[in-house]
Image (tube, grey):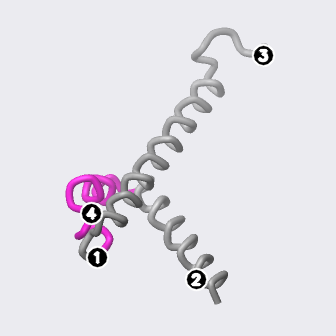
Amino acid sequence: MAQKASGKKRRLNRGLVLRALTDPKFRKLLQTNPSKAIGKTATELHQREVDLLLATVKGIETHIRLVADELLCLNGPCGIA
């Protein structure tokens, strides 16, 4: 039973990360009013989870930017030539 709950929470978290990555308004709402964004009163635990979620999103965006720079050869010569 605990494994089922864990899987459901993981899917929910994955959905929140995806939404925060693709919806700037939702991401801003997470930053300014987490209670409204998650649909319940934000406890200290919820706030820590929101902070972790926002840090995860920031990390993913950083990796995307770095990969884009590598693909476009913006950091010097690339091995394509």
Question: Mark 3 = which residue?
Answer: 79
Q: Secondary structure at mark 4?
A: helix
> Quick one: 58 or 76, which is closer to the camera?
58
Residue at 24%, 74% in the rendered image: 41
Position of residue 74 relative to residue 2, above or below, is: above
In the image, is residue 32 part of the stretch drawn in magenta? Answer: yes
Question: Mark 2 = which residue?
Answer: 5
CA gap, disc 3 and disc 1: 49 Å
Residue at 27%, 63% in the rendered image: 34
4 and 1 marks in contact (CB < 8 Å): no
Question: Mark 4 = which residue?
Answer: 34
Whichever of callouts 1 and 2 sits on the residue coming sooner in the sequence is 2
Q: Position of residue 55 (x, y in %)?
A: 44, 46
3 and 1 marks in contact (CB < 8 Å): no
Q: Secondary structure at mark 1?
A: loop
- Residue type at mark 1 is Gly
CA gap, disc 1 and disc 2: 19 Å
- Residue type at mark 2 is Ala
